[in-house]
C-alpha cells in the first residue's frame, strides 16, 4: 500500500467502507503533499501527461461520458485501487463530472444508488452532480 490521503485533506471523500478518494478541480493547482498513485480524468479532451498512472474518460462538461462501458470499467478500477492506493478523480470544475463519478464509486462501495448523490453532496461538495441526467446516471449505475 502506498499510503492513503489525509481524510481531512481538501476534496477527500471517505466512502462508506472507509476508502478515501480525492476529488479535484483541474483548474486549481495540484495540492501540496502526496501525489495520486492513480487518477481518473473526466474531460472532453485528452489531459496533459502526469507522473502517475491515469485513465482518461471522454466526458464533456455538464453531460455524460461518451463510453458507458468504458466508464463502468474505469470506475470499478478506481474503486478497487482505492482499497490500497491514493486515487484521484478530477474534471475541470471538480463538481459535476467529478461528483457524478464519486457518487458512482459510493454505489460500488455499497451505498444504495438512490442515496449516493446526497451522500457526495454532504461529504464532498454541496454542488456535486450538477444536472438531472447526471443524477439519473448515478441512480441507474450498476
Image (cartoon, rainbow, N blue to C red):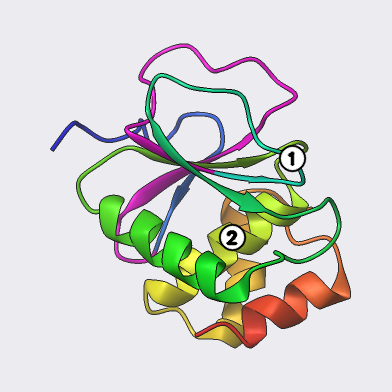
Residue 34 rendering spot, x and y as whole percentages: 35, 19
Above or below, 13 against 113 in this view is above
Q: Which residues lie in the magenta part?
A: 16-40
Q: Quadrant of the N terminus?
A: top left
Q: Which mark is residue 101?
A: 2
Return the residue nearer the eye: 119 or 81. 81
Left or right, residue 88 beside residue 114: left
**Among the 4 quarters of the image, the one containing residue 85:** top left
Mark 2 or mark 1, which is nearer the start of the sequence? 1
Q: Residues within 10 Å of mark 2 (few under 14, many from 20)?
A: many
Above or below, 57 against 87 in this view is below
Residue 60 rendering spot, x and y as whole percentages: 81, 53
Q: Which residue lies at the image location 57% right of the left edge and 66% below the top edge?
A: 103
Q: Which residue lies at the image location 27% right of the left edge and 35% below the top edge?
A: 4
Give the residue at mark 1: 45
> Quick one: SS at disc 2?
helix
Magenta stretch: helix, strand or loop mostly? loop
**Among the 4 quarters of the image, the one containing residue 78:** bottom left
Work out which residue is located at the far top of the displayed protein and give it: 32
Left or right, residue 11 beside residue 95: left
Above or below, 85 against 130 in this view is above
Mark 1 → mark 2, Cα distance in angstroms:
17 Å
Label 2 near label 1: C-beta < 8 Å?
no
- Look at the image and say whether residue 9 sits in the magenta stretch: no
Return the residue nearer the eye: 15 or 74. 74
Q: Which mark is residue 87?
A: none
In this view, the mark in front (1 or 2): 1
Above or below, 28 against 114 in this view is above
Residue 38 rendering spot, x and y as whole percentages: 37, 38
- Look at the image and say whether residue 20 sits in the magenta stretch: yes
> Quick one: SS at disc 1?
loop
Q: Which residue lies at the image location 47% right of the left edge and 11% below the top edge?
A: 32
Amino acid at each position: 500500500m502506498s499510503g492513503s490521503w489525509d481524510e481531512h485533506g481538501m476534496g477527500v471523500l471517505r466512502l462508506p467502507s472507509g476508502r478515501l478518494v480525492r476529488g479535484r478541480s483541474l483548474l486549481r493547482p495540484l495540492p501540496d503533499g502526496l501525489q495520486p498513485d492513480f487518477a481518473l480524468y473526466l474531460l472532453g479532451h485528452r489531459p496533459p501527461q502526469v507522473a502517475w498512472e491515469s485513465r482518461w474518460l471522454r466526458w464533456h462538461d455538464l453531460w455524460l461520458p461518451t463510453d458507458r462501458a468504458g466508464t463502468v470499467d474505469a470506475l470499478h478500477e478506481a474503486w478497487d485501487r482505492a482499497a490500497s492506493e491514493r486515487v484521484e478523480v478530477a474534471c475541470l470544475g471538480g463538481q459535476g463530472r467529478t461528483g457524478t463519478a464519486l457518487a458512482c464509486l459510493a454505489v460500488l462501495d455499497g451505498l444504495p444508488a438512490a442515496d449516493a448523490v446526497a451522500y457526495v453532496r454532504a461529504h464532498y461538495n454541496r454542488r456535486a452532480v450538477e444536472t438531472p441526467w447526471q443524477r439519473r446516471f448515478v441512480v441507474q449505475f450498476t
